[in-house]
Amino acid sequence: MTTAEIAELTHGETRVESVVTGVAIDSRRVTPGDLFVALAGERANGADFADDALAAGAAAALVPRGQEGPGRIAVDDPLDALAVVAREVRLRGTASVVGITGSTGKTSTKDILAALLAPHTAVVASRQNENNELGVPLTLARIEPVTGVAVVEMAMRGLGQIAHLAAIARPQIGIVTGVGPVHLELLGTIENVARAKAELLQALPADGTAIVPYGEPLLEPYLAGLGCTVVSFGAEQGADVQLRAFTATGGAGQAEIALRGRTLSVSVNFTARHNALNLAAAAAAYDSLGLPLDELALGAGDVAFSRWRGEEIELPGGGLLIADCYNANPTSMAAALRHLSESAAGRRRVAVLGDMAELGADAGEYHREVGELLGELGIEVVVAVGPEARAYGGRWFATVAELREALGDVIRPGDAVLVKASRSVGLEDAVEAIAP
Ligand SMILES: Nc1ncnc2c1ncn2[C@@H]1O[C@H](COP(=O)(O)OP(=O)(O)OP(=O)(O)O)[C@@H](O)[C@H]1O
Ligand SMILES: [Mg+2]
């Protein structure tokens, strides 16, 4: 895109004449030809680094009005302008766009779908957790003429946000991984969570495909009004894409996926059943893109999961550490505890669990329910960290630092250990202490 085109699209002012081939928001990571977007951060003001970015080869710098200068395009709001540019990049490309939202499993589903697509086409996918009003445009801006599919994670903390992201990304395929009690502090009710997720489905074109969990009553009210095709996924009989069976041993899994009258056997490089359900959702998107079903399994053994999401690390003495401290909510906590039980294979199970954040008024109840599940599963050792986590039962620590001190007498060689909490708890410190 030329700087003149960018200025026109963003109602900006500029005297630069150059061609832009990429986007950077950190002046230290500029590659030649990038458009440097000067964002206002908490500590730093992006515009202060515009000259560094230009010196590093940026084709132009998008700055707020009042910060005009050589090489700069001055706009009302650089973040809004980036969204406009990203949307244009997406519209000019020929890539199909798959949007993924849901309370849990967005990043994992994105990583699985990217792996399924990789043998067939050039894929752009959100990096790590690039899923908000900044991350989505950054992902879209990486679309190139050769890109076949863009897989875009979309998150929200309130109503209207997914609609905004979908208006930028214009997905043809939308996946809702699930609806659960997440971000209740802002949304209030789980019905509102469903309503927010449904914004993605409502943004799909008539020839698009909505991929939704089978039988989810909370999404039901929105499905009838959709003009597009609806495909359900799940483990239950009746799902359009059904996970018929899943078994796992020694770091690998085997899934049986039934769709369109066929049953496919898929070898995967993961062991958690919740990821096999994410695979079913990804398989639905793969099929909607018109790719050959016979070749669905080609890339399934090469999923590169993002960090701290159920990463499995061998411990001395035959032990296993499941590092799942990227985030936690009632749905993912239950899935992870079931996975711990399935993976333990006779080993003593140790659950090191922290608070689940942002659950609003019912937070206490949600934490008590985790405590009940720990009891039902008969988890041998429960270690809880943080104020809310006290409701899990077991041995309690106020802080991760206190927990770290005691880890030596909590974990024994040969244990199967799950470490999980909301990100804000910082439980990755415990992971580092367990598996340095
Ligand atoms: N389908 C699923 N059902 C239940 N739990 C899941 C599922 N998929 C993943 N998880 C659990 O949720 C954790 C977070 O997964 P992931 O990062 O994919 O979610 P996300 O929706 O992208 O989260 P965020 O909102 O932080 O972006 C995983 O480590 C795992 O414990
Ligand atoms: Mg994510």
Image: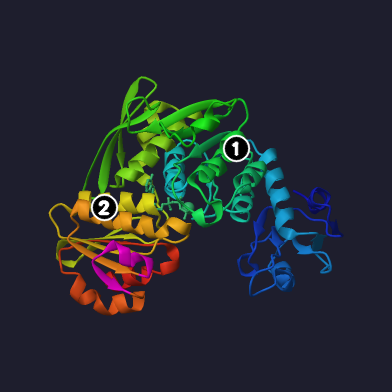
Q: How crowded is mark 1: few (under 14 residues within 10 Å), some or many (20 or more)?
A: many
In space, the residues marked 1 and 2 are separated at their CA atoms by 38 Å
Give the residue pinned by disc 1: 171
Q: Locate residue 226: give its quadrant.
A: top right
Instruction: Kindly identify the residue that appears in the image at 39 percent across and 29 percent down.
Output: 241
Q: Locate residue 52: give its quadrant.
A: bottom right
Instruction: Kindly identify the residue that appears in the image at 46 percent across and 34 percent down.
Output: 212
Reply above or below: 16 against 95: below
x, y (%) of residue 233? Answer: 40, 32
x, y (%) of residue 336? Answer: 31, 52
Instruction: Kindly identify the residue that appears in the image at 74 percent across and 70 percent down.
Output: 47
Q: Give the range drawn in magenta.
A: 386-397
What number is the disc on residue 373?
2
222 relative to 111 in the view: left or right: right
Helix, strand or loop at disc 1? loop
167 and 59: which is toward the camera: 167
For the C terminus, the quadrant is bottom left
x, y (%) of residue 109? Answer: 43, 44
| In this rendering, the label closer to the viewer, 1 or 2 | 2
Extreme residue toward the left, this view: 346
